[in-house]
Image: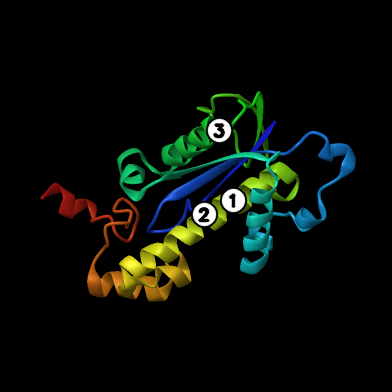
Amino acid sequence: MAGIDEAGRGPLAGPVTAAAVVLPPNWISSGLPPELAELNDSKQLSESKRERLFAALHQFPEVDFGIAIVDAGEIDRVNILQATHAAMNRALAKLRQPARHALVDGNPVKTLTVQQTAIVKGDSLSFSIAAASILAKVTRDRLMVDYDREFPAYGFAKHKGYGTKQHLAAIAEHGPSPIHRLTFAPLKPPAQRELF
């Protein structure tokens, strides 16, 4: 059974990422290893704790996971919902062993390639979804730090592409970068301009 979660649906720039995680079944009886004792919804954790748990998840070879990234160009082509669902399916496809069932954070995903159970606030109710949320979030945050080096005018390392005052001011001054989502307001041109 795989837990699935995503990161980056709301930002104005950068990719959306998703992760699928299968934790070892024997951990149900033995409990989580001490290194993963703080496993929780990534939004409830500090950056340093997320980084520590990200590293810990990588150190256990019996933890099976897949991570997928869908870039801003694809998001603009298909829309953010479809891009998010595509990332989830691609993450599932990267598991070493195919999952037979998925626990999905939030609402059901109609296009998911396996049977699923959707759990509202699942990232705080399921260890496997929490692990997926950490892998997806840390992966995306690291990408945005890399993009900050490539496009330093926007402050991506600080706001990770979300629509902060600083970010909106940078867009107004410099225009969009190659990683901005051009179909997202305020980047999308007004409807009247499109008609011309």
Contact (Cβ within 8 Å) of mark 2 with mark 3? no
The residue closer to the viewer here, 136 or 118, is: 136
- The residue under label 1 is 135
The residue closer to the viewer here, 142 or 87, is: 142
Where is residue 18 shown, x and y percent of the image? 53, 44
Q: Is residue 9 above or below residue 119?
A: below
- Tag 1: amino acid: Leu
Where is residue 64 shown, x and y percent of the image? 64, 37
Q: How packed is label 3: few (under 14 Cα within 10 Å), some, or many (20 or more)?
A: many
- The residue under label 2 is 139
Q: Is residue 147 above or below residue 19?
A: below
The residue closer to the viewer here, 57 or 125, is: 57
- The residue under label 3 is 92
Q: Is mark 1 on a helix, strand or loop?
A: helix
Which image quadrant: the N terminus? top right
Where is residue 123 shown, x and y percent of the image? 68, 48
| Horizontal relation, residue 113 to residue 156: left or right | right
The residue sitting at 72% across, 39% down in the picture is 23
Q: Is residue 111 above or below residue 186?
A: above
The residue closer to the viewer here, 171 or 2, is: 2
The furthest residue to the left: 196
3D distance between C-alphas at marks 2 and 3: 16 Å
